[in-house]
Image (cartoon, rainbow, N blue to C red):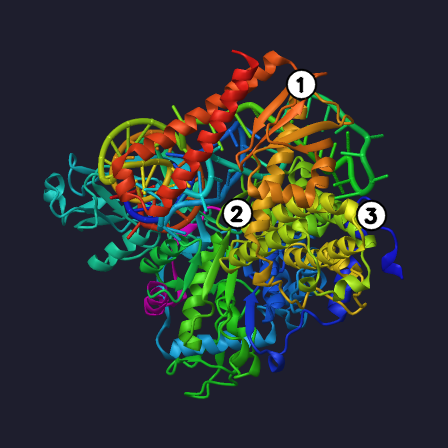
Amino acid sequence: MARQQELDSRYDPAGLEPALYDRWQKRGYFHVSAADAQVPYVVDIPPPNVTAALHMGHGLNNTLQDVLIRWRRMVGDAALWVPGTDHAGIATQNVVERQLAEDGLRRWDLGRDSFVDKVWQWVETYGSRIIEQLKLMGCSCDWERTRFTLDEGLSRAVREVFVRLYEKDLVYRANYIVNWCPRCGTTLSNEEAEHREHGGNLYHIRYPVVGSDRESLVVATTRPETMLGDTAVAVHPADARYAGLVGKELRLPLTERTIPVVADPAVDREFGTGAVKVTPAHDPNDFEIAGRHDLPKIDIMNDDATLSDAVPEAYRGLDRFEARKRVVADLEAGGLLVDTEEHIHSVGHCYRCGTVVEPRLSLQWFVSMRPLAEPALAAYGNGELRFHPEHFGSTYAHWLEHVRDWPISRQLWWGHRIPVWYCQTEKCGATVVLRDDPECCPECGGDLIQDPDVLDTWFSSWLWPFSTLGWPDQTEDLEVFYPTATLITAADILFFWVARMVMAGLEFMGELPFTDVVINGTVRDHLGRRMSKSLGNGIDPVEVIDRFGADAMRFTLVNSAPIGTDLFLNYQDLDATFRVGRNFANKIWNAARFALPLLDESDAAVDLEALELELADRWILSRLHTATREATASMERFRFDEAAEAAYQFVWSEFADWYLELIKPRMRGDRGEASRAAAAATLWHLLDGWLRLLHPAMPFITEELATRLPGRSDEFTLMLGPWPAPPETWSDPAAERQMAALQELIGTVRNLRAEYNVQPGTRVDVHVASASDALRDALLAEGEGVRILARVEELVESAAATDGDPGAHAVLRSGGELFMPLSAVIDLEKERRRLHSELQRVQQLLEATRTKLANEKFLGNAPPEVVQREREKESSLQEQYSRLSEKRGALGE
RNA sequence: GGGCGAAUAGCUCAGCCUGGUUUAGAGCGCCUGCCUUACAAGCAGGAGGUCGGGGGUUCGAAUCCCUCUUCGCCCACCA
């Protein structure tokens, strides 16, 4: 049979992974249908942008989702992972616009329809790249359910939601200051404007009082060019300095206009000069002030941030930054620039192209957020919505408490068209909001024009948990799979996406879209910088998979990234970065390479309870029982790193380092057939157990090896479980105590051998005296293990651990002492020093323990078992102490 | 300005919520010795930590409280 062929000593993932993935997919393991779903467990992928190529952030995020979903699938849930991509309005439009630019074209040259066609073509050609890359990682998404935020079904959901919100007055159209990206030519929400510290200047400008040669007022601003749009200057009503000026007119420099001085409590008397120039069309504060004082609002900019015809001719058509220089120069020339001081302030930048955004008065559609935020806040407050780590809940709540209305219209062509039509008939002028495209105005039958704008991309992603299941239709999928269970995502879209999904779920479904939100860390380079294309410090997951295998990458990521903690990866040394996972995969491979040929089909069927299990067997089963319990408990708390660590430690440090070594003689038949059979059956069940334990993190190698276990049919898979649940009877504290004593003994012998440079090939004699019961039992069962693992010739149990030869002494914490005659190599002076320092260490511990036990308050207040433990510690230390000092005495001071 | 978080071995982190079982752990790195027929991507041994500083609570503090210092992240209408 093919699977019996010999395995290479180096694991070659590239030769196995694609075929395994293909097999899973062909057998339909990833697909879940509502009809068969008993206990659903649903995870929604955070849809990557359709323009995206897989980066390590996706690598981490999707690995964690796959670990979770594979685990739940093994546990027996109908585990559904819904995949898809996001149409990413601005980002995608930018990509295609850049392409056009190479041919010297702009989108207006094509016209709206053919431009949108062009974007669709791009999406069809390149849009599935990231999906294919997720498959390389092993992601077990239900690909039959792959959705796109701009596909037909989701478009219906978007439109339904817009109409419902409009009907409830939760969506409205208004003139307000929004963030405007002059490069992308569109509005942005607050979340889409990234604020960065920026070193600029604070310009102090003099505005003369009309009709006075002497009186003037000095204002301070960081954006002097906006003065051309000033319609007032505001001072604080209680500011004595300016009390006499309120109500007077000022001459606005560089223009022919005059503007009033108004008093408004919003002014901070301490800042700058205490007088604020009011530019209502370009500053949110000023907009508010203008409202209170009925001031005109002059928009001085064109869409591309050049100055408009609203400013004096000299400045028209200048770019805003060019205009800034010109205005400053002209003011200076006119003697009106009083002062220029350096000033650090934060400036908004477009999150897609990095251009400085301009606050600008604009007519946009908004979603009224307060009514939606209240229930979202309440769901967190009452504990229904949980965050992991918990503290992200505070961030979530803080945002909701201060949430502002959401501008949702975007002046783009790529996206969901706003379902609003304006009647062109003058006397009607109706605004029509409809689920279906109208032919003519339902009010008057006149011509309609649809709003030219599209909706913010997030206006479709916030519906993801139910729109992907068929909503607004009442589908069976929706019935069975909503709400989903857990969302795993990065912190940077907590507001963009997570909070808004909660709002949408509660508003439109009446139920939270998920109950647990797991926040994974940010992937950074070894210098702590966010990985980015421009810095060139990214790591390509596809390259990592090619070189080390998907399992190695996944394990490394899972193991080294506790949720919520940033992950630092060195992009300059991938070898070092992914060594943990690669080496572990290789270790697993080789352990199996050793074990598999020792087994046959009969080992699978054997009931372990019916066998004469030996110490090592009982011990390792007990350890597997513990490791499995720990891993399971960790998974339940989304502590994927802990689960991986528990499995790693078990497989490497216990199964491979100890168990496999201990059973080698038994597997050769040295202790008879019964012993061999017991070890073989135990081994079979161990492999089966820990391969399952590791399957969520390392699906490929575990599946491959589990399938090669004798007795497995070609139909076998780990994917469908069961998740291991070792019986309570495997727990064996006595065996654990005995093995611990044995391990200490072997460790001590190895240590002494190294101390005295005993050659590895040299066998030594070891005398053991005063052994504890556990050690005595262990030696009885596994004396041979000691001989092999510690390279011992004669293992002598005697009352006095010495035969008169010079040698090395040691005392065991678990009880007992040992003596190694080393006449050939012993250095008595060294042995004295060694015993002395050992003695000092024990003495210190002993004194600390005695001080504690001498404290009556301790005896009176501490729980009895703590006192008891302390007493046992004292007697053990006392025992060690007296034996050590005896030995040292024997060697002379 | 507001919010959240971090500080434990050279590096990356567990442990802290629920104080006393570790005589503070892991991985990587480092040192020493080994190609011991599953694995040199390995095996064995070892060095390395006043748990950021100070105070407090307690019989007992890496763990709870206060404070200081230093870093990080997020939010904000800092004219």
Q: Which residue is mark 1?
A: A805
Query: Are the two marked residues, 3 and 2, in contact with CB atoms closer than 8 angstroms?
Result: no
Where residue A241 appears, as percent x and y from the top left, is: 12, 38
> Which callout, 3 or 2, points at the residue further toward the start of the chain?
2
Q: Is residue A352 left or right of residue A703?
A: left
- Tag 1: residue type? Asp
Figure check: A39 above or below B8: below
Residue at the far front in the pictured view? A799
Q: Is residue A246 left or right of residue A42?
A: left
Query: Are the two marked residues, 2 and 1, in contact with CB atoms closer than 8 angstroms?
Result: no
Q: CA distance from mark 2 to mark 1?
A: 62 Å
Where residue A263 appears, as percent x and y from the top left, is: 16, 50
Q: Residues within 10 Å of mark 3 (few under 14, many from 20)?
A: few
Q: Which residues are magenta?
A: A354-381
Magenta region includes residue A379: yes
Identify the subunit bearing mark 2. A
Of helix, strand and loop, which one carries label 3?
loop
Where residue A704 appears, as percent x and y from the top left, is: 77, 58
Q: Is residue A346 left or right of residue A827?
A: left
Q: Which residue is mark 2?
A: A522
Classify the position of the N terminus of chain A by image quarter.
Answer: bottom right
- Tag 2: residue type? Thr
> Which callout, 3 or 1, points at the residue further toward the start of the chain?
3
User: Which label was assigned to residue A668?
Assistant: 3
> Which callout, 2 or 1, points at the residue further toward the start of the chain?
2
Q: Residues within 10 Å of mark 2 (few under 14, many from 20)?
A: many
- Tag 3: residue type? Arg
Residue shown at the point (44%, 51%) measured from the top left: A193
Q: Is residue A481 left or right of residue A651?
A: left
Magenta region includes residue A94: no
Where residue A596 appears, as percent x and y from the top left, is: 80, 54
